[in-house]
Amino acid sequence: MLYKIIMSKHIPFLLLLIAVVSCHGDIDKSITTNLQEEGNEIFRISLALEESRILAFQNLQFYRAADTLRLAGCPIVKVSENEKKVNLSFPANRNCVIGTTLSRAGSLELEYINTGALELTIKLTYIGYKVNGIRLEGVREFKQTRGITEPNKRTEVFENLLIIDEKDNSSRISGRFEHLFSTNSNEEKTFTSTGAIEGRNITGRKITMSPGIPRRYDINCINSDFVLPIEGSETWQIFRNEQLATSHTIRYNSDAACLAKATITLHDGRVLTYQQ
């Protein structure tokens, strides 16, 4: 009987405690919904994807004859002829001829696989790799069909690629892109990319990217270690639930040769600008 009385006296207090805890959970959700941090994450994902892509466009012969000090990041190049693999490792304090705008560590492995009579797949694997403190884990595949039909197109696919910031927060993304190299008479060294991404962001929420204006790249700029596209746009959505999402728009443009920037317009209208 005494036990029942004590419990009945504490019921109002327990109900109040439950209400406070419940409200605190909603507050936490509000705090983690930081639009500026979402913008930072979008740029982090974009930079991580841009930086090593050009390396997977090169064929095996290119790496056999490469002047490594003139490559972006000055990697040490090791070619395995039997396995048709190339390892690119990025030690500290390499004196690059071209200079570098990005810091790199770890290594990349490129594997060249004939997946058909006229199809070559280049598999890019990250091995303890970091760029500007961003760690990447996973594999990307680039397919090229050799022959008279679309010889200048590359198809890129990846699944469950991890992009990890300096605080060990990770974005997990899958995507598909098509890259088309210019073939105009002036031999303009450019290529365009279009594609889509889906996955989850650092807070566990669903994230997607859909294309707008195709990204356009200047290969001479990339070879000088300026990897951002000089033109393009896309829309990123981060979902709060199955129906509700915030939408952020990213636009790329270049004010001067190779000095491209990314401008992100957040869901609430604020504008963030990023450069390498």
Image (cartoon, rainbow, N blue to C red):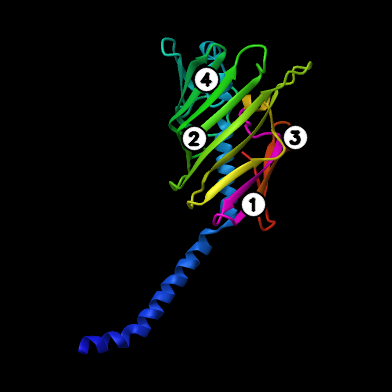
Cα distance in 3D space between marks 1 and 2: 23 Å
CA distance for labels 3 and 4: 35 Å
Name the residue beneath numbered marker 4: 121
Note whether 9 is above or below 59 in the view shown.
below
Of circles 3 and 4, which is in front? 4
Where is residue 230, by image quadrant? top right
Nearer the observer, 113 or 187 = 113
Residue bearing mark 1:
247
Q: Which residue is mark 3?
A: 256
Task: Choose the circle earlier in sequence order: 1 or 2.
Answer: 2
Looking at the rendered image, the disc whose residue lies closer to the viewer, 1 or 3, is: 1
Tell me the residue at 67%/18% (across/down). 150
Asked if residue 87 is positioned above or below residue 269 in the image, the reply reads above
Looking at the rendering, which quadrant does residue 258 occupy? Answer: top right
Instruction: Tell me the residue that label 2 is attached to.
Output: 159
Q: Which region of the structure is painted magenta?
A: 225-246
Q: Is residue 80 above or below residue 181?
A: above
Residues at discs 2 and 4 in contact (Cβ within 8 Å) = no
